[in-house]
Image: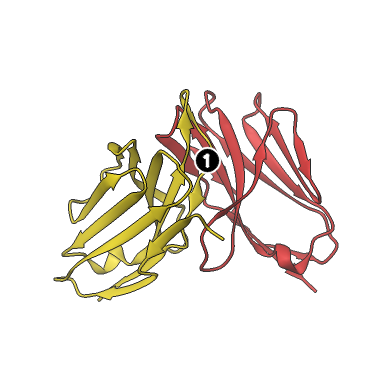
């Protein structure tokens, strides 16, 4: 089993749609979780951290389920500018274990 | 604007060349990373430095040689590379304390092509 798994997509959704991505992780001792966004031929940039109680930032909502070992990202009212690859990142055991998922590609269509 | 600067942004080299990638972070972080990103693959961690000490080397071939002269600068020396080493090389930094690291901040990457 991969340490961090994501559906690679692509997810093609119309503008205004709601889309959700899931990410599963194998290490139950993982401590911190993030969603990063990567535009084509650009570097990854932090989108949001994922907190145990769930957190929201505008149209974006992140959830953590430790029992089932997955995190999710919900995007409401999708915009064309949301088109990118979304990377799930899991931190375990300090700075050594920073594991990225393969990313989920989102394409928002006019 | 990114607090992590990488140069050069693009590099084309032959298999017998020697070149270096440079990374500088202006965020006061104490940990720096080299990642490799190839097409359709997840980011691969290559090296981690914490307080200038190398703490991770993920079975990276010896044709890649990292150097961290201080907590703000990180180099990746390249020699006798192979065409399959062509990729985007990303530098990142983070602040590590009390057994945990905060989020990683990435540079814009150095896109390497090996002919």
User: Residue B111 location in percent, x, y?
Assistant: 38, 68
What tint does the image give chain A?
A: red
- In which image quadrant can residue B20 be found? bottom left
**Number of numbered discs overlaid on the protein picture:** 1
User: Residue B92 location in percent, x, y?
Assistant: 44, 50
Quarter of the picture holding the N terminus of chain B: bottom right
Question: Which type of secondary structure does the marked residue at label 1 adopt?
Answer: strand
Identify the residue shown where x is 43% and y is 60%.
B5
Q: Any idea which chain is the yellow one in this picture?
A: B
Compared across the picture, whether A26 is left or right of B35 comes to right
Identify the residue shown where x is 82% and y is 54%.
A18
Camera-side residue of B88 and A103: B88
* Residue denoted by label 1: A4
- In which image quadrant can residue B31 be found? top left
Can see residue A85? yes
Compared across the picture, whether A42 is left or right of B25 comes to right
Camera-side residue of B108 and A6: B108
User: Residue A55 location in percent, x, y?
Assistant: 76, 37
Chain bearing mark 1: A
Query: Is A27 located above or below residue B45 in the figure?
Result: above
Quarter of the picture holding the C terminus of chain B: bottom left
Colouring scheme applied when the structure was drawn: by chain
């Amino acid at each position: 089993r991969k340490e961090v798994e994501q559906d690679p997509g692509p997810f093609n959704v119309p503008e205004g749609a709601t889309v959700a991505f899931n990410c599963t992780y194998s290490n139950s001792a993982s401590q911190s979780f993030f969603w990063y966004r990567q535009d084509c031929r650009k570097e990854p940039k932090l989108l949001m951290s994922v907190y145990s109680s769930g957190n929201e930032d505008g149209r974006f909502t992140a959830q953590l389920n430790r029992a089932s070992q997955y995190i999710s990202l919900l995007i409401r009212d999708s915009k064309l500018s949301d088109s990118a690859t979304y990377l799930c990142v899991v931190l375990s055991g300090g700075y050594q274990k920073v594991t990225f998922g393969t990313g989920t590609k989102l394409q928002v269509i006019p | 604007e990114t607090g992590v600067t990488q140069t050069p942004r693009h590099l084309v080299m032959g298999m017998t060349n020697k070149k270096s990638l440079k990374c500088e972070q202006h965020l006061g972080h104490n940990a720096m990373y080299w990642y490799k990103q190839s097409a359709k693959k997840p980011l691969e961690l290559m090296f981690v430095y914490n307080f200038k000490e190398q703490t991770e080397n993920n079975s990276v071939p010896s044709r890649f040689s990292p150097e961290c002269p201080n907590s703000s600068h990180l180099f990746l020396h390249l020699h006798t590379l192979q065409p399959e080493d062509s990729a985007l090389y990303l530098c990142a930094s983070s602040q590590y304390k009390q057994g945990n690291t905060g989020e990683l901040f990435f540079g814009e990457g150095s896109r390497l092509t090996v002919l």
